């Protein structure tokens, strides 16, 4: 459709995002950041690296594959926008989904209790218990209570107008990348957690100008951290994976930090580092070119596997479905990877494409837009009504859907695991959330805010507490 015109594809990509932002702003769409986080993660792995290919000093790479893959990601984000803006509000307001039932009076210890639950699940994962069938998936998703807990601790400080505690919890949001780097040798998992928290916080911003300025500054800092990390990544992983003492790991990280480099778009080496790990569009493009020749599509096989992933391994002892998409990527792109030192994610754009081509991408992302936005809205109305148990019931599955670089098997398994773990934690912490509810008619001079409309924004709603 775009005749290999990468600049036009990139411009259309941003136009779609711009329309989405404008429409959501005009409708004062509710949200706790799930939709924005999904779009931003898509932008990071499908748009950022592609820009390098329109720069005359970018050398090497795969421009043809990158263009073809970026075009498919454009169809994906456009379909996601349609599902988010058109389908989700209709479904939510139709009464099909469970809505809020009142304003809760919660114990102020509950946010920290959720945070503590996340830390506990992380600790359990390092024990033999964390390696039992089906237990691993549940405990892994339970770690996301750390994200939800920090978000709710910041929200609690925001409600109280305590700027010092707000700053403290924002500072805590920057710690996950350092923690995952020194314990696992990866920065991506922690960066994803920090980004999710920061976007949650941004949902409460009233000044759009300040928000954009802060986002640009943080984005530039993030790119600078990334190119610096990529330069010293091998030394850090050698230390961490070699199970050195933490002192040695800190030394490896400190050496990388001392060689910090600010991102320079005119530096071909920086562009290559971005292209190396953030160019998901290139992988999609290789599959597009390969399948256009052999037509050997999966025809729904991986989607069937994603459905089977919902069955716990504890109930299906001989279950053959496993996570990890490196082999799939190699099969459909024709590329080879060193899977011992590098993880290769297939991502939903590539996975939908290898099943049913562009049609699969469009339909798949319309459904994702519907699901992610619906969870965002439902989590938002629970938060506004101080139903924190209800908030995590929708927020944690929403986080599971944000794996834009993973396999759908991983997504469905994480969603199922998050539902189980939220049920368990909420059951145990029920004592911290008093079931008494306030009828909507009593609130704010008779203004009914329960349930929250799908077009109401967080900062527009009366404060019920």
Image (tube, rainbow, N blue to C red):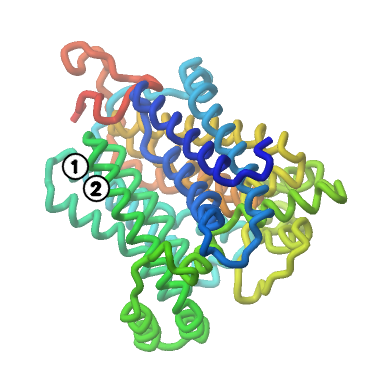
Contact, mark 2 vs mark 1 (Cβ under 8 Å): yes
**What residue did someone put label 1 on?**
158
> At 64% from the left edge and 49% from the top edge, which residue is drawn?
67
> Residue 350: image x %, image y %?
67, 49
Q: CA distance from mark 2 to mark 1?
A: 6 Å
**Residue 145, horizontal then vertical, whole percent:** 40, 52
Residue at screen point 37% across, 80% down? 256
- Which of these two is toward me, 52 or 369? 52
- Note whether residue 358 is visible: yes
- In the image, 50 versus 197, the foreground residue is 50
The answer to whether 68 is drawn above or below residue 385 in the figure is below
Q: Secondary structure at mark 2?
A: helix
Q: Position of residue 405 (x, y in %)?
A: 57, 54
Which of the image's four quarters has the C terminus?
top left
| Mark 2 residue crowding within 10 angstroms, few (<14) / some (14–19) / many (20+) | many
**Which quadrant holds the N terminus?**
top right
Q: Which residue is mark 2?
A: 154
């Amino acid at each position: 459709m775009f005749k290999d015109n990468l600049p036009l594809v990139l411009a259309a990509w941003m136009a779609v995002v711009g329309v989405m932002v404008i429409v959501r702003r005009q409708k004062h769409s509710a949200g706790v950041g799930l939709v924005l986080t999904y779009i931003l993660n898509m932008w990071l792995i499908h748009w950022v690296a592609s820009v390098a290919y329109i720069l005359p000093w970018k050398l090497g790479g795969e421009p043809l594959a990158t263009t073809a893959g970026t075009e498919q990601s454009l169809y994906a984000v456009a379909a996601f926008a349609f599902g988010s803006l058109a389908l989700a509000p209709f479904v939510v307001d139709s009464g099909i989904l469970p809505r809020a039932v009142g304003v809760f009076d919660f114990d102020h210890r509950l946010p920290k209790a959720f945070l503590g639950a996340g830390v506990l699940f992380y600790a359990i994962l390092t024990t033999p218990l964390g390696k039992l069938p089906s237990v691993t998936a549940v405990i892994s998703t339970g770690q996301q209570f750390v994200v939800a807990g920090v978000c709710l601790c910041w929200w609690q400080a925001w409600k109280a107008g305590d700027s010092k505690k707000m700053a403290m919890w924002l500072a805590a949001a920057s710690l996950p990348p350092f923690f995952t780097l020194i314990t696992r040798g990866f920065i991506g998992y922690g960066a994803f957690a920090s980004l999710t928290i920061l976007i949650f916080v941004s949902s409460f911003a009233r000044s759009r100008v300040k928000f954009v300025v802060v986002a640009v500054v943080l984005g530039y800092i993030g790119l600078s951290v990334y190119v610096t990390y990529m330069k010293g990544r091998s030394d850090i992983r050698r230390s961490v994976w070699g199970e050195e003492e933490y002192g040695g790991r800190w030394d490896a990280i400190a050496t990388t930090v001392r060689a910090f480099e600010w991102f320079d778009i005119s530096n071909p080496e920086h562009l290559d580092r971005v292209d190396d790990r953030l160019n998901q569009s290139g992988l999609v493009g290789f599959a597009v070119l390969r399948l256009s020749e052999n037509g050997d599509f999966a025809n729904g096989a991986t989607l069937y596997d994603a459905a089977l992933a919902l069955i716990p391994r504890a109930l299906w002892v001989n279950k053959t479905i496993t996570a990890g998409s490196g082999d799939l990527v190699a099969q459909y792109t024709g590329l080879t990877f060193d899977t011992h030192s590098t993880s290769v994610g297939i991502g939903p754009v590539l996975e939908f494409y290898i099943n049913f081509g562009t049609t699969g991408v469009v339909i798949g992302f319309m459904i994702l837009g519907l699901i992610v936005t619906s969870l965002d809205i439902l989590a938002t109305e629970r938060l506004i009504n101080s139903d924190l148990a209800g908030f995590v019931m929708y927020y944690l599955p929403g986080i599971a859907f944000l794996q834009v670089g993973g396999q759908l098997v991983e997504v469905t398994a994480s969603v199922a695991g998050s539902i189980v773990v939220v049920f368990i934690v909420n059951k145990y912490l029920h004592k911290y959330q008093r079931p008494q509810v306030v009828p909507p008619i009593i609130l704010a001079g008779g203004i009914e805010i329960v349930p929250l409309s799908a077009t109401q924004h967080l900062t527009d709603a009366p404060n019920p507490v």
